[in-house]
Image (spheres, coloured by chain):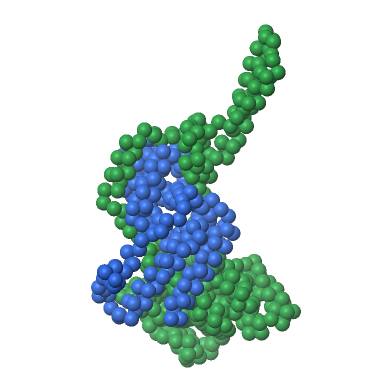
Chain colours: A blue, B green
Amino acid sequence: MELLRQQATHTVKAAIKGDTASFEQLVQIHQNRVYSLSLRLTGTAHDAEDLAQEVFIKAYRFIGSFREDADFGTWLHRIAVNTWLNRKRKMTPVAAFSLDEPIGIDEAEVKREVADFSGDPEKVYFDNQMSERLQRAVESLPKEQKAVILLREVEDYSYEEIAQIMDCSVGTVRSRLSRARDALRKCYNGLTEI
Amino acid sequence: MDCKKAKQYMSDCIDFRLPKRAAIRLDAHICGCSRCMHEMDILHQTSLYLKAVYPEITAPIGFSSRVMSEISRSSRRPVPMAVPFKLKRLLMPVAVMAASAILIIGLYFEGAFMTVSPAIEEQPQALIEEVPYQNGNVIDAHNVAEDNETALLPPLVLPEEVETPHKSDDVAGNIAVVAITPVAPDTPVLREKPADHSLAAVSNIQKGNGDTAITDSSVDIIPLDERIETIKTDLTEIPDISIFIPRTRIVNSVSVNVVVGRIDEALKFLERIELVYGMVPDVTETNLLGDGTISMIRSYTIPRSFVNSIVVGMSSIGEISEVKRSSIDITADYKELLDAHIKLIRELSATGEGVSELKDLISHMVLLDNMARHEVSNIIITIEDNIDF
């Protein structure tokens, strides 16, 4: 574990000194997490790749400003969230096409369905409904709340780390998180009461 | 506490951010309010679903190559020097002052030999404009807005590591050593045969508290004298001992064996567990048993997670003469805890709010007081929950 940590530090140091091969190594190490976060934030594979790519390009350009005692992965996430928030601020809302939308055949509609063999059909149905609803609920959250809930619940960052990533106070993180959870709880309640 | 306040506390509570006092009050409220209990359950369920909804996804094939080719295609080069944000802010006025000083000196010398028109005298003001500045270099002004996400990042400071609850330097006197073993669902656990006096105590506890579901199979006995060195060695070989209970709480069974010299050390440890689980005991019992041993039972109900119930059984096994020998040693932490309880009880008595909460607090306080007066040699804690994957 310690050896791995030392290796990682060495790679970051080399990348800071301008070693492109080391930077490429860092891209390989962090690409999955950065891409995952990008996908969660943007919602589409195309936008996610675009965002993730921009994150690494920015990281390459500004690697000189990275403090070596910090965590490189957290720094990348910080760039990702800020870049995404900036893009959202500039962007006008665009209607998204969902792959779950029914397929229109003449005048009738057929739901896209994939077979699932994972056990109790009732539970599978509930889980699917819940996942779908939650995803929609997360999508509909204000962008800052969405970022906070993803960083906390999915990426497992502490309040302090989220505050650093999003450049806000811990109090703001708490209130955004509380509001986001409240919205998601309502969504969950909605499904269980059906 | 009313439901509105309880709701405000819930989010902090599931992240273990709630101050202890507030956590106690929230728990007391939740235990008596089925609606809030349900809300808390949902918060946990939602949290678990979110993790499942957003699994980690692998980057597309060839992603890193595309990034690298984009980087090599781009004419932009990395900015080599790192100047901390605060230092930049300090240096900027110095740079501006130096620039203006040079301009003023320049103008002075020019003025000595030339006639300076009023328009030229105003010029230095116009020249002292903010130059786009990053990492020690002047950069392209058009890129400033676009790159502000990284350009203006203050340095990251990671939080300090969480203190592990089990480590103690108090080895010479009353030894406080804790071995924590997260048990995977199918892992066979080697159990030591308890010494006779320990068996008697365990048996007494079982008889006296039949409804708390402590069974032989859930109790591990580690004789103190023989095992200290082994446990100390074991501890050094567990690298990430502080991460012993997953945040998601989907745990099949967690077995915690504690060997401590002092019961108040054990209490501190228990409180850490309570903090991690976000739980407050709803049954606490301390008994002096017939054979001179002390038993303590703490029972917890966790209404707001997947865990249906957690039963913590503690038995303290020691000779009665030892117990008497080292009585009354209330530590500073202890006093603080007692004071906090007393203060809260006074507040609650004054407002007349929450009678059941008041009762719980009083019994907790009495327990604390009892425990501060006794020393024990062995404490066994077993936590079980009823989760099936």
Q: Report the front residue among B316 and A184.
A: A184
| Image position of B371 with respect to B178: above or below | below
Residue A118 against residue B73 in the figure, above or below: below
Which of the 4 image quarters holds residue B265? bottom right
Which sits in the foreground, B97 or A98? Answer: A98
Quadrant containing the N terminus of chain B is bottom right
Q: Is residue B173 visible?
A: no
Q: Residue furthest front?
A: A107
**Total number of numbered labels?**
0
Residue B26, placed above or below residue B156: below
Image point 60% across, 30% down: which residue?
B129
Residue A63, position as x, y percentages in the image: 42, 40
Task: Give coordinates of residue B104: x percent, y percent.
Answer: 66, 19
Above or below residue A77? Residue B111 is: above
Residue B209 at least partly seen: yes
Q: Residue at x 35, y 36 (%)?
A: B74
Of B152 and B368, the residue lying toward us: B152
Toward the top, the furthest residue is B113
Q: Toward the viewer: B126 or A149?
A: B126
Report x, y in % for residue B113: 67, 8
Q: What x and y, as percent, mark residue B51? A: 40, 66
**Residue depicted at x 29% and y 71%:** A107
Placement of the C terminus of chain B among the 4 image quadrants: bottom left
Kindly give the residue lying farthest to the right in the view shown: B350
Tell me which residue sits at (33%, 67%) in the image: A100
Image check: A45 left or right of B332? Answer: left
